[in-house]
Image: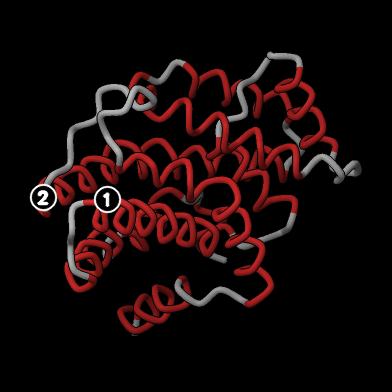
């Protein structure tokens, strides 16, 4: 019984309502997908300390390292915290979260792309004047008191549009991993089948890892 319920829940994470999907897709295509997808061009001055990707095994190792060290432990965790800070009206905690991410060494190679992506999307949220926490965070970024990291902005995005956190996190994983696989895989000549193999392998464990990140009150809902 519980196994069937878990399988049903995992399947639901991959089904995003049309309007939610449209808004999320716009968020990634316009702001995140392109700058983070350029991580595949490792070795450029923009991304410090990333390995060169020349083969299927190189890309597989990079994706696994990225998923374990950055995606799950930094990005998804930050999105969850930002989502709840914004939902609960905690502007001060949101700004503190921004400062904490700024001090995280493992995120340094992604800093330039993350900052640009976050700030671009944050400006697009400016018209939402009735969202007090959003506006305070936006002002703090404009006054250089915060950076505007893209995982924080994505958490705010999910909150202000009242998107379910589970589906939002899974969509983030699909878009980010998918973008990296397509960009890097194409550049090194992988087949579509090889790219799908890599993408599916990296995403397979994400539903269970997302559950671990969510607070107990969400798990029982």
Q: Sequence order check: which comes first, mark 2 or mark 1?
A: 2
Taking the image as shown, residue 56 lies to the left or right of residue 121, namely left
Q: Position of residue 91 (x, y in %)?
A: 74, 29
Q: Secondary structure at mark 2?
A: loop
Taking the image as shown, residue 140 lies to the left or right of residue 128, namely left
Q: Position of residue 29 (x, y in %)?
A: 55, 55
Q: Residue at x 43, y 48 (%)?
A: 213
**Position of the C terminus by quadrant:** bottom right
Q: Is residue 179 above or below residue 90?
A: below
Q: Position of residue 191 (x, y in %)?
A: 18, 68
Disc 2/disc 1 C-alpha distance (Å): 9 Å
Q: Secondary structure at mark 1?
A: helix
Neighbourhood count class around disc 1 (C-alpha, 10 Å): few under 14, some 14–19, many 20 upward: many
Q: Which residue appears farthest toward the right when viewing the image?
A: 130
Tell me where residue 194 sits by quadrant.
Answer: bottom left
**Position of the N terminus by quadrant:** bottom left
Q: Position of residue 80 (x, y in %)?
A: 53, 45
Q: Which residue is mark 1?
A: 184
Tell me where residue 202 sits by quadrant.
Answer: bottom left
Neighbourhood count class around disc 2 (C-alpha, 10 Å): few under 14, some 14–19, many 20 upward: some
Taking the image as shown, residue 214 lies to the left or right of residue 182, namely right
Tell me where residue 142 sits by quadrant.
Answer: top right
- The label on residue 55 is 2
Q: Residue at x 39, y 80 (%)?
A: 5
- The label on residue 35 is none
């Amino acid at each position: 019984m519980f196994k069937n319920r878990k399988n049903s829940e995992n399947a639901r994470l991959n089904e995003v309502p049309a309007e939610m999907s449209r808004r999320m897709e716009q968020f990634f295509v316009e702001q995140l997908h392109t700058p983070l997808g350029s991580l595949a061009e490792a070795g450029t001055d923009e991304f410090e300390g990333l390995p060169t990707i020349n083969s299927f095994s190189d890309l597989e190792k990079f994706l696994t390292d990225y998923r374990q060290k950055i995606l799950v432990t930094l990005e998804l965790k930050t999105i969850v915290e930002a989502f709840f800070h914004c939902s609960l009206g905690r502007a001060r905690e949101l700004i503190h979260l921004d400062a904490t991410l700024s001090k995280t060494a493992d995120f340094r190679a992604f800093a330039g792309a993350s900052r640009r992506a976050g700030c671009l999307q944050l400006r697009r949220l400016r018209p939402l004047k009735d969202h007090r926490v959003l506006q305070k965070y936006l002002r703090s970024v404009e006054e250089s008191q915060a950076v505007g990291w893209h995982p924080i902005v994505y958490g705010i995005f999910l909150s202000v549009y009242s998107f379910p956190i589970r589906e939002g996190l899974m969509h983030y994983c699909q878009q980010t991993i998918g973008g990296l696989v397509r960009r890097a895989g194409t550049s090194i000549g992988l087949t579509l089948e090889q790219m799908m193999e890599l993408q599916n392998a990296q995403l397979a464990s994400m539903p269970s890892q997302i559950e671990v990140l969510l607070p107990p009150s969400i798990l029982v809902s």
